[in-house]
Each structure stands twice: as C-alpha cells, then as structure tokens.
Amino acid sequence: MATTGTQTAASGGDVGTVDVEDLEYSGGRREQRPWEQVLFFWLCAGFSAFHLWVLVGPVIVRAIDNELGLGQVFYRAVAPNLDQELFRAIHLAWGAVLGFGFYSLAKGRGTKGIPWYDWLLMLGALGCAVYMWRNLDELQMSQGATYDTPDLVYSLVGLVVVFEFTRRTAGNALTIIAGVFMLYAMVGHIFPEGSPLYHNKSLRDLWFAFPYIYSNLGVFGTTLEVSSTFIIMFTVFAAFLGRSKAGDYFNDLSVALVGWARGGPAKVAVLSGVMFGSVSGSSVANVVASGAVTIPMMRRVGYDRNTAGAIEATSSTGGQITPPVLGAAAFIMAEVTGLKYAEIAAAAIIPCLLFYIACYAHCDLHAAKHGLRGIPRAELPRLGPLLVRLYMMAPIAVLIWAFITGYSAFLAAALGIVLCIGVSWFNGIRWSRSGVTWRRGDDVMGGRAIVEALEIGAKDCIQLVAVCASAGIIVGVIALTGVGGRFAQIMQAIAGQNQLMAMVFTMIIVTILGMGMPTTAAYAIAAAVVAPGLQQIGVPKLVAHMFIFYFAVLSAITPPVAVASFAAAGMARGDPWKTSWIAVKMGLATFLVPFMFFYSPVLLGQGTFWEIAPVFITAAIGVWLLACATEGWFTEALALVPRAILAVAAVAFIVPSNVTDVAGVVLAAIAWALQRYVFRVRNA
C-alpha cells in the first residue's frame, strides 16, 4: 500500500512520547501477569457488552417480538430486567474491579501482578454489589430514614472502595474534596446556629451519613446513573469509531483539505480537532492521537516547539465542546437540567464554531506573520480517494440524524456502533483494472476487532465511573445538609444581584476545580454547588450550565495545571509553561465566548434564524479581530496603538448590541487607517 501524505509528514518530524494515563491517572499502570492480562481483557469486554445488552437489548428483543407477532413472549423470557439501583451498583463494582486491577497504589510502586490488598479491595467492591442484590427491598425502604449495623458496614466498605478507586484514577483533588464534604456531613451541626455552614442538629448521629450517602440519594444517584447509561454507551461508540480507523481517516482528510494552505499543518490540527475531537471524551487523548501527525508537520514548516504544542493543545481541547458527542459532562448536564441531550448538543454548535474560528484565525495570522507555508501538494494524501471513502462519516451522520429525529441516545449510539462495524467492511474493497476485489485488512472489523473495541471502551470509561461515584458523594451531602442553598446565598452576598460579577466568580471557581481534576468532576461539582446560585439571581438554566461546562473544558489549557498543554509540550519536546501560556493566548478569544452567550443566549440557539445569524456574524468578526490584536498582525505587523484599538474594536463586536457593533466598525476602521497612513509611514 502506498504511504499516505500523513504518514510521510509524520515520519519526517520529531515527536516525543506521552503516556496519556500518566497525565490523567494518579495510580501507576501496573504490569499484570499473563493470566491476569487475559482475565482483565475479558472482564473489560464483558463490562461493555453487559451495558450494551442491558441498555439496548430490551429494544432489540421487543422489536423481534413485534416482527414475529409474539407479543412479549420473547421479551419476558430473554430481556434483562434489572432494578436501576442494582444496575448502577454492578456498574460501580465492575468498574472498581477494573480500576484496582489496572492501577497500582501509587506511581512508582507498580509491582508485577496484582497484590493481595487489591484483590481484597475488588472483593469488597463485589461484596457491596452482592449485599445490595440480597437486601435490595430493605435498603430501598429504609433509605434516608433508618439503618442497622450490617447496612452501616456495607456502606462504610463501599465508600472506602469509592474513595480509593477515585484517588487512583481521578487524582487527589477530587478525593480530598469529596472527603471534605463527607466530613462536613458528619460534623456540620457543630457550627454556630445561623452560620452558613450550620446544618440540622438532629443529625448528631454521625454514622447516619454513611448509609444515606451510599444510596441512590448519593453515590447511586444522578451522576452514576449517567455514567452507567449515556457515558458508557458513547465511550464504547468512540472506541468502535477509533477501531474502525475513522480517526486515521479524519486526520488524512484534514491534511488533504488544508495541509497545502499557509500554515497548513496548524490548520490541519484545528480541523482534526473538530472531526476527531467530537468523538473523544479526553483532551489529552485528542492531543496524543492528533498530535502524532500534526506536531511533526508543524515543526517541518517552521513552527517552534512551544507554538506547535499550544496549537495542538487548544484545538484538541475544543473537541469536548464539539457536537454531536460532547464531553462526558454534557450527559450529566442533560440529566441535571432535565433537557434532552440533543438540545444541549444543538446549543453547543455556535460556541463550538466561535472556538474554532478563533483557533483557525490564530493559526493563519501566526503563519502570515512568520511567513510559514504549507506542505507541498505532491506530498499530501490525494483528496479523490478520500472523498470516495466519505462513507467513514456515516456513523457520525447517522448519530446526528438519530438525535434530530428523536431516537433515544442509547439507540443512537447503538446505531453508530453497528455502522462502525459496517463501514469498516467497505475498507476491504480494492479497485484495480481487473475489477473490484475484497481483502480483509486491519481496518476491517471482525470478531476479534469487535471484542478489542469493547475492551477499549471499558478502559476509557474506568476513570469516569470513579468520577461520577465521587460526584455522587458531593451531591448526597448537599441533599442531606441543604448546604447547596447556603452556597447560593453566599454567592448572592458576594455578587449581590450583579450577574456579571457572579459569572466571573463562577469562572474562577470552575477553572480552579478543573486544574486539579477531570472535566467531568469539575462540572459535576460546580453544577451542584454554583449553578443553583446563578439560577437564583436570574441566569437562565441552560446558560448557567453551559457556562460552567465551557470553563471546565478550558481548564485543560489553563496553567499552572494544564494537562492538555503539558501533553502537547511533551510531544513537541517544548517547555510546558511556555506552551501553556501560548495556548492561553490562542484561547483568549475563546475565554470570552461563555460571556458572549451569557449576554446573548441566542448564541446557544435560543431564537429564530434571523435573531441568531447577525449576532453570530458579529461575534465571529470579534473573535477574529481579537486574534489579530493578540498576534499583532492585521494585513501587516501592527504597531502598538492600532493593536490596542483593534482589541477594543474586537470586544465591541463581541458584545451583542447594535451600538457596540457600530462602534466596532468605527474602531476597526480607525485602527486600519492609523496603521496604513501613520505608523507605516513612520516605520518606513
């Protein structure tokens, strides 16, 4: 097979290696014994298959019954009929077993094989699920009311498992925050009555908090429900999409479309972030997958190491706000707000476009400023053969169609999975002068590839199971103590009725949370603690939650802890701090986007086409002009005064108002005139 342009470009540059798990997980990835590798391979595949059967199986069986005219005979005999709380308990226990099997106690302490204490933790996780199964009715009847000694022991063991599972896979920050909330539930009654942190003195029985929180009022509540349904389904879908080689196709198509342009490799990174990032829930995973191709190409045409890393980090981070498959936190948003996931995905379209317009503008302006060219067309993949393979887009297209036509998210993901397998078989078609033949290759999914995709999907979901379980602890404490309402009062006291100040306060909180924990955890905590306060001062529900979600995503490129920037710096062999600050500069316009849809909810699709279009156009002009100001390039290198005026013009365009739009036009014209007729002459 001929080498593609992507492969050629990648092989010609230098790129460092980055361990995704080393950046995203706290425990060390251990080396398993051969028999343990086999066991956990099948445990992972079984984890994904179990969820697919429970979530989609009933639909399939019911369709078979209807087709054969059997009523519900087959359905009653075969379809899974698990209680939802028990299903979540199995989901958590199975996920914890995988977590303890793959990740050691701490980095640098990885032993070959799983030690006895991890087997004990696995046994504890499974024991809790068995206990719930055996005592389900009694536990559900007594939730939030009474408990006995076995219930207390069961909940204590379960919470120990959740805390250690979270610490290994999601980091110390989330574990500590969940622990502080847990401690507050037990001792909050000792605060002075009337203080914001006081809660009901009737909770003096400290042990009551454990069974309460380890129930569907806490751990097994909304967040774990989302993890066991939406998140696992779309994580498995992403795994099938990757295993069908769609990610490679997206990269090749991006290179063919814009690789030849000025600063082409950087624009490839942006386009690849849109296409590949929309089906991956991890900024770091996006960086590693796309950066292996784009970073060497950027280095080849003249981008320095830090800028190449920053471009890749910023564009890959945007994948989590790209429809149709947003980051995992978006599924929690759908459950918390009561909105359909399709509505949230639709609301994310314009903010996503503005994000990538800003990224593309920075890439183009940087290339113009430094005279950077693209890859020679002769070395690029041929566009014709790639267009013939547009069928690789079918899973994404069908997913969008399913959302629009009202299919459930589960069925939409299941259709996407089936299509991933189907389209991969078209990859085996070979065209020649003698005719059309079919040959099975690595990009054609057979039985083993399907099982491997199931395994990958389970591995990708491990961290999210822990995050959602710990977020459930925090939600449970808020429900138990009522502290959420007092947080809202505190926010009102700080910001008064000034919504802008409240949004700035929220931005700071979410960004700090996002530095120390995964996006999903940062969003879940802020949604539980901060969002109610925003809604109380009049911020619309969708705007409040999208604002939080957006900054939780952007925290991946925000120093001092910027995992996406650090990963990209590692691959580009650049300086992590410099890379992070360049990423912030590139993302400066995108940091303003949440404030734009706060001031003008029409940017979340809340309005008619004629209301949305002009606001979007002026906002797009604004983010482009802000990129010009930060890069110091308009049609030529900008002097300081025109640059400052252009920055003000950009903000004027970004603020949604006819008056500010006119002011933006005037200021932009003044900046252009000063640069052309005053500073060009002075510098000549």
Image (cartoon, helix red, strand yellow):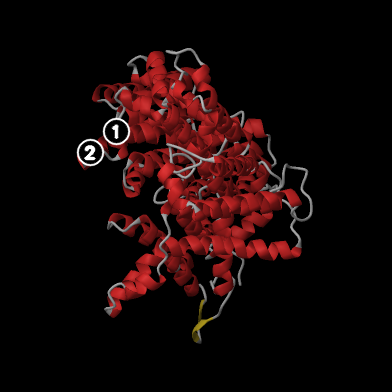
Horizontal side of residue 576 vs 376, given as left or right? right
* Residue 93 in picture, x, y percent from top left: 57, 52
Horizontal side of residue 655 vs 426, given as left or right? left
Residue at 47% across / 19% down in the picture? 679
Q: Marks 2 and 1: CB-CB under 8 Å? A: yes
* Residue 601 - label: 1
Q: Is residue 290 visible?
A: no
Looking at the picture, tell me which residue is in the foreground, 431 or 508. Answer: 508
In which quadrant is the N terminus drawn? bottom right
Residue at 35% across / 48% down in the picture? 341
* Helix, strand or loop at mark 1: helix
Q: Residues within 10 Å of mark 1 (few under 14, many from 20)?
A: some
Instruction: Report the number of numbered marks.
Output: 2
Q: Distance between the Cα atoms at labels 2 and 1? A: 8 Å
Relative to 409, say whether 502 is above or below. Answer: above
Looking at the picture, tell me which residue is in the foreground, 605 or 408. Answer: 408
Relative to 656, say whether 424 is above or below. Answer: below
* Residue 358 in picture, x, y percent from top left: 44, 37
* Residue 607 - label: 2
Tag 1 or tag 2, which sits nearer the N-term?
1
* Helix, strand or loop at mark 2: loop
* Residue 264 in picture, x, y percent from top left: 53, 48
* Residue 167 in picture, x, y percent from top left: 63, 39
Horizontal side of residue 135 vs 652, given as left or right? right
Relative to 510, say whether 409 is above or below. Answer: below
